[in-house]
């Protein structure tokens, strides 16, 4: 029987809108979740490929057997690596290298890339070096003056060079070191005889496997991590990735929340209007003897059936759209995306329940209170108290006052206006309650749309700014002071634009205000372009001990991506003074404040400096950045090397061979693979956001339409009366449009202001974006909403201009 | 504070089985309110209404609905057909509410009685005023009520159609032996009533 009722009620526009809104919201929620999950599954491979596995445990000591056993018990794949600094020897040539010994399982995720000839196109290497062979990074070839198939010595063991290694997964963009890489087989460690008591070694355990098992492993292993160890996942290990993914995930959440709010309001408006249309029907039911219970069941079952059908359709649509887009996403991600349906299905059900019972049901539930007497007296409405909350009532009252005052004000000022416009503006004040409800709904729709637009635009722009067209794809470290000028000349002659060459002086932080800093025993590790890495460690809550050496620099030029948050930046007056600028995260971890005195050991000498400024640094910017910066003429007396970054176009890559030959001591690091991966991620997230924004726009239009038609009957009735008494079409158009346009303008203005305020908060607190007020929104927002509301209003009421009045009356 | 408005005062009457009671009066005299009270659509602020021995005052809204469901039929000036329902579905409504087993065939029979078999699948807005009121009559008689309430059944119809509707209403009333209470401002209809009540400003006129 209820299906019959549903099919009959389905003739009402309101229930169709309610149905479509439900479908769309379930569609949006489920597609967003299916997508997010799918992408996360794909990303776990991609991000894992940045680390060589899903997790990495680094330790100065051999990895505890119980940790390896636990990973094995949880069916996680593992592989161990051992890294140590060693001098490579070829005849009379020597070069310091960071040697990594790996087994056949390495890497668990991602790839090794290499080539058999220097600076030729690389390819994935499907194995690791055979015992007795070594793969070297390009710079080692010139340092050692070797070629493929030559033999070098590592420790006491000879190794045959078999590949030029161009990329290794766990080296990434933010974890490279000062010495170039040599890769050998783990079986060869013993024969090198370089591992002696007291040797500085870095052991790493790479772990990969299903998310659930990894989570279990995380929970088990985290309490066991000692201060000298670090346990990181791919996201934590890579600031670039972390920022991107966090922002992407936050935006997807924002879309889902906005969708639900819009859907809730749209469904509430449609249900309210549908319920209002049912007043007479229910009165007839009551008149013919239907009980309140019967009415309750009739509408409850109907709305549940409607919700279920909409839920299934919405979910299937979501699934099919994601399925349809799967290819695109897989191409963008260069990874297989696994679509899982259980969690999205649960969310779809929850969405249906919330929308059905939270928004659609209340107006229909009130129908059971309709008096049968309404059949004789139409003025009788639903019995009982208003169920509007205090907040909504207060807001409504506020808007009510606003709209009345506005209408009256404009009415006074409009005495010289066209009489039709005056009538239209006066209508605003005539129906303050209805108009304030509409104003509230319009404002909400536009605010949601503006907010999504603002965040989307800035987010995508920020992402693309991360990798400008000619972003540096090579880093160079270890440029000696004597070759600095020649090096710059070389780049200049070959039209390779480079940034400033930053001096690097190695030093230790010994004390803060004479309080000795505890040192960790981890191997020196550098992040983002040569700086000592102190990035967050998921394994250690709170302060992490400082690494042995820091890369200190000096200069007066503040980098573009640095911002002073305390004190003032170094000036020419500071030249020669013992002052420093430090990075915010560094200051927080070491509990350093403005005015604190830091003691550094550089070589054999001690240097003290006062903190005069604290900076934020974008570690994910691919620019050289430093924790500690001195002014000139303080530390430049110490041995210095230089670093920089530059972009090399693909056709100029062979030039690098010459570069290495001319400057054999430099260490050239190729980060083009990392840039490619970041670009992939940015493209993927941008595409997903664009698609979901499209869905939300549809939802916003539906809500807009629901709101416009919500009191169209009253307007149509008045319009028809105007026509019946002889008002011409043009005048009538003025009356109606002036009302709609004013509503559109005010709601657009409220929306633009509200969205800007919310965006300011979100940008700073959630998305970590630079908030810049968008003044254009304050101009175009109201204009755009005027056009939409005016256009929608005209569409809704246009029949008044076409059909005879009597025909319209019969339809209302 | 809104002033209390007395719509009906000192109205006392009996309606016997088979009576045809006409309630006459000018607009605003309280005719429709009285009809609503008699039908149990509303309760008087003072006074009592009985159906046989059952006091409507003692029943809640659902109790009175139950009484109407089994015993009363209604015809209204504005027809009050459900616009989203076809003629047949409108007639089916009280039958479905009462749980009639062969509701559809019964509804079709009712429509045949008002000579609308050919238009049973039409929606109200596809029917003329007279046809709509015939559908309303068919719906009112569908459950074979013991009492039928009609609120100005010809008020929205032209004279010729109105006469036809009245003929049909009385013919069916006689056939089904239903008690009929109807409100009208047409004094000519008083001839066919067994009892007449004249209301003026909420009071019965002698």
Image: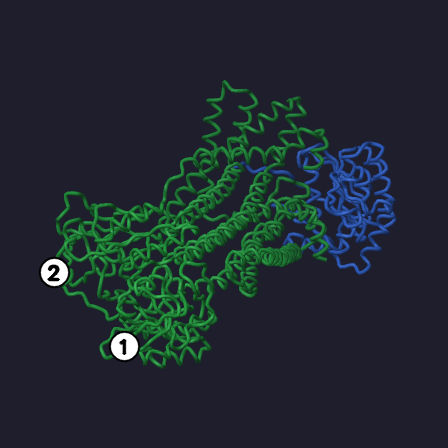
Residue A691 placement, left or right of B90: left
In the displayed image of the protein, which residue is found farthest to the top? A416
* Residue B62 can be seen, yes or no: no
Residue A800 placement, left or right of A766: right
Residue behind mark 1? A194
Q: Mark 2 packing: few (<14 Cα in 10 Å), some, or many (20+)?
A: few
First-in-chain label (1 vs 2):
1
Q: Nearer the viewer, residue A81 or A192?
A: A192
Query: Quick check: A397 above or below A163?
Result: above
Q: Nearer the viewer, residue A363 or A357?
A: A357
At horizontal 53% and vertical 23% (from top left) the residue drawn is: A422
Q: Colour of chain A?
A: green
At horizontal 32% and vertical 45% (from top left) the residue drawn is: A492
Question: How far across and down, in percent of the image, does residue B25 sit?
Answer: 73, 34
* Label 1: which secondary element: loop
Q: Quadrant of residue A308?
A: bottom right
Question: How far across and down, in percent of the image, does residue A144 sit?
Answer: 30, 65
Q: Quadrant of residue A641?
A: bottom left
Query: Quick check: A18 above or below A799?
Result: below
Question: How far across and down, in percent of the image, does residue A105 sit?
Answer: 44, 74
Q: Colour of chain B?
A: blue
* Label 2: which secondary element: strand
* Residue A680 can be seen, yes or no: yes
Residue behind mark 2? A606
How far, Cα to Cα, is label 1 from label 2? 32 Å
Q: Chain of mark 2?
A: A
Q: Quadrant of the C terminus of chain A?
A: top right
Query: Quick check: A232 above or below A392?
Result: below
Query: Quick check: B122 above or below A222?
Result: above
């Amino acid at each position: 029987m209820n299906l019959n009722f549903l099919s009959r009620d389905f003739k009402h526009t309101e229930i169709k809108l309610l149905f479509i809104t439900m479908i769309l919201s379930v569609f949006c929620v489920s597609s967003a979740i299916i997508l997010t999950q799918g992408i996360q599954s794909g990303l776990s491979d991609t991000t894992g490929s940045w680390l060589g596995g899903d997790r990495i445990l680094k330790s100065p000591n051999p990895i505890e057997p119980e940790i390896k056993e636990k990973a094995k018990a949880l069916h996680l794949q593992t592989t161990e690596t051992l890294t140590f600094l060693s001098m490579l020897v070829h005849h009379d040539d020597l070069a310091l290298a960071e040697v990594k010994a790996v087994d056949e399982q390495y890497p668990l995720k991602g790839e090794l890339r290499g080539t058999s000839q220097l600076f030729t196109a690389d390819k994935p290497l499907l194995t690791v070096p055979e015992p007795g062979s070594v793969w070297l990074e390009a710079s080692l070839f010139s340092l050692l003056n070797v070629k493929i198939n030559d033999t070098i010595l590592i420790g006491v063991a000879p190794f045959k060079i078999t590949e030029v290694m161009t990329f290794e997964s766990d080296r990434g963009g933010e974890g490279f070191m000062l010495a170039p890489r040599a890769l050998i087989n783990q079986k060869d460690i013993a024969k090198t005889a370089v591992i002696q008591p007291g040797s500085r070694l870095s052991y790493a355990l790479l772990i990969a496997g299903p998310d659930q098992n990894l989570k279990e492993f995380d929970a088990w292993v985290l309490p066991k991590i000692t201060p000298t160890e670090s346990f990181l996942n791919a996201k934590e290990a890579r600031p670039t990735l972390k920022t991107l993914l966090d922002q992407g995930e936050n935006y997807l959440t924002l879309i889902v929340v906005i969708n639900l709010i819009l859907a809730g309001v749209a469904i509430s408006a449609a249900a309210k209007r549908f319920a209002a249309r049912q007043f007479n029907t229910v009165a007839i039911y009551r008149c013919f003897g239907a009980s309140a219970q019967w009415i309750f069941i009739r509408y409850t079952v109907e709305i549940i059936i409607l919700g279920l059908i909409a839920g299934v359709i919405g979910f299937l649509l979501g699934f099919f759209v994601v399925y349809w887009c799967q290819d695109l996403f897989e191409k963008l991600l260069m990874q297989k995306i696994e679509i899982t349906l259980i969690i999205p299905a649960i969310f779809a059900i929850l969405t249906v329940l919330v929308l059905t019972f939270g928004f659609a049901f209340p107006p229909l539930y009130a129908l059971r209170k309709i008096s049968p007497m309404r059949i004789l007296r139409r003025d009788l409405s639903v019995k009982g108290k208003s169920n509007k909350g205090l907040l909504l009532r207060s807001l409504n009252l506020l808007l009510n006052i606003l709209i009345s005052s506005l209408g009256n004000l404009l009415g006074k000022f409009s005495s010289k206006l066209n009489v039709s416009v005056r009538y239209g503006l006066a209508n605003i004040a005539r129906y303050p309650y209805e108009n304030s409800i509409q104003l509230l709904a319009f404002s909400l729709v536009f605010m949601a749309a503006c907010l999504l637009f603002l965040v989307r635009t800035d987010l995508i722009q920020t992402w693309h700014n991360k990798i400008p067209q000619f972003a540096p794809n090579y880093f160079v470290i270890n440029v000696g002071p004597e070759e600095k000028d020649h090096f710059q000349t070389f780049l200049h002659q070959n039209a390779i634009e480079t940034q400033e060459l930053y001096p690097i002086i190695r030093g230790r932080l010994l004390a803060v205000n004479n309080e000795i800093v505890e040192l960790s025993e981890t191997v020196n590790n550098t992040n983002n372009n040569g700086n000592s890495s102190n990035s967050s460690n998921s394994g250690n809550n709170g302060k992490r001990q400082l690494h042995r050496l820091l890369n200190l620099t000096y200069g007066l030029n503040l980098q573009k991506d640095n911002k002073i948050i305390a004190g003032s930046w170094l000036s020419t007056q500071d030249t020669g003074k013992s002052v420093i600028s430090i990075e915010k995260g560094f200051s927080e971890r070491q509990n350093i404040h403005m005015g604190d005195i830091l003691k550094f050991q550089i070589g054999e000498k001690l240097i003290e400096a006062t903190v005069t400024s604290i900076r934020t640094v974008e570690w994910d910017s691919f620019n050289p950045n430093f924790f500690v910066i001195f002014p000139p003429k303080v530390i430049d007396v110490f041995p210095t090397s230089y670093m920089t970054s530059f972009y090399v176009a693909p056709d100029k890559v062979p030039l690098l061979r010459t570069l290495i030959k001319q400057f054999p001591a430099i260490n050239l690091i190729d980060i083009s693979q990392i840039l490619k991966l970041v670009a992939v991620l940015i493209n993927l997230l941008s595409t997903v956001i664009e698609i979901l924004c499209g869905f939300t726009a549809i939802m916003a239009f539906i809500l807009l339409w629901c709101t416009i038609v919500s009191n169209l009957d009253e307007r149509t009735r008045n319009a028809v009366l105007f026509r019946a008494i002889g008002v011409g079409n043009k005048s009538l158009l003025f009356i109606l449009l002036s009302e709609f346009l004013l509503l559109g303008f005010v709601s657009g203005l409220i929306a633009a202001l509200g969205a800007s305020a919310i965006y300011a908060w979100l940008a700073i607190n959630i998305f970590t974006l630079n908030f810049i007020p968008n003044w254009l929104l304050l101009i175009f927002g109201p204009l755009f909403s005027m056009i939409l509301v005016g256009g929608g209003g005209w569409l809704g009421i246009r029949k008044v201009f076409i059909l005879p009045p009597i025909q319209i009356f019969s339809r209302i | 504070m809104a002033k209390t408005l007395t719509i009906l005062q000192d109205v006392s009457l009996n309606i016997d089985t088979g009576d045809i009671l006409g309630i006459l009066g000018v607009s605003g005299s309280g005719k429709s309110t009285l009809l609503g009270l008699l039908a149990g659509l509303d309760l008087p602020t003072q006074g009592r209404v009985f159906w046989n021995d059952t006091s409507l005052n003692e029943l809640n809204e659902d109790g009175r609905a139950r009484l109407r469901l089994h015993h009363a039929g209604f015809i209204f000036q504005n027809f009050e057909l459900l616009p989203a329902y076809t003629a047949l579905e409108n007639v089916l409504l009280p039958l479905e509410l009462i749980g009639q087993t062969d509701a559809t065939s019964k509804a079709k029979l009712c429509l045949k009685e008002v000579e609308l078999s050919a238009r049973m699948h039409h929606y109200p807005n596809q029917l003329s005023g007279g046809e709509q009121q015939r559908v309303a009559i068919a719906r009112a008689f569908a459950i074979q009520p013991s009492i039928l309430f009609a609120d100005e059944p010809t008020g929205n119809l032209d004279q010729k159609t109105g006469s036809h509707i009245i003929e049909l209403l009385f013919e069916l009333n006689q056939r089904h032996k239903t008690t009929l209470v109807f409100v009208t401002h047409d004094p000519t209809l008083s001839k066919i009533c067994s009892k007449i009540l004249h209301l003026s400003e909420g009071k019965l006129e002698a």
